Amino acid sequence: MAGEVNVTIVGNLADDPELRYTQNGIAVVSVRVGSTPRTFNRTTNEWVDGDTVWVRCTAWREAAENIAQSLTKGSRVVVTGRLKAPSAYQTAQGEARASLELEIDEIGPSLRYATAAVTRRAREAAIESPWAGEKPAANNPADAWANPAEAAVDEAPF
């Protein structure tokens, strides 16, 4: 939508993903991502951690189930999504706080310090494509996109 703030966050999951289902059976997952900036102090020749920024991230439907199956506490992730307005609250000690919330568009493991094996998940029958009932027109000379290219190539392309 227009006017939404899109951001990308790189950080670690604070907890295992929390998967729930609405009364209508729609999956929703919540994860908390923490990102701590590090700077090098040239005076002391050591790295110094800054304040950790915590972001509550939410995903829905199939993405929610995939996140719950794939990621665990401590996983380094890259998250892109739409930033929601911060909500203000008070801690038990009376401190004023605000929480950042992000509606996840995409999330995945960071491959900077790790490897991952990706398994494509089969589509569920409940999710129907608007083109599911259509069959491609076979051998229709008027439709160039419906016909495959000829496999034999006699000449170099240049």
Image: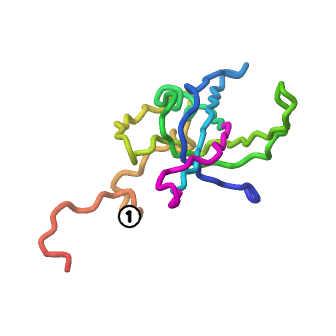
Left/right placement of residue 4 relative to residue 65 reads right
Residue found at the far bottom of this picture? 158
Residue furthest out toward the left: 154
Q: Disc count in the image?
A: 1
Task: Find the magenta span and give its range.
Answer: 41-56
Which of the 4 image quarters holds residue 110? top left
Left/right placement of residue 84 relative to residue 141 reads right
Q: Quadrant of the N terminus?
A: bottom right
Q: Nearer the viewer, residue 122 or 130?
A: 122
Q: Nearer the viewer, residue 131 or 67?
A: 67
Residue at position x 40%, y 45% from top? Answer: 111
Q: Considering the image in quadrants, where does the C terminus appear? A: bottom left
Residue at left 76%, top 59%? 3
The secondary structure type at the circle numbered 1 is loop
Q: Amino acid at mark 1?
A: Ala
User: Does 89 sit above or below residue 22?
Assistant: below
Image coords of residue 17 (percent x, y): 57, 27
**Residue depicted at x 67% and y 42%:** 103
According to the picture, the residue beneath numbered tag 1 turns out to be 144
As drawn, 148 above or below 111: below
Q: Does 1 lie within the magenta span?
A: no
The residue drawn where x is 65% and y is 45% is 51
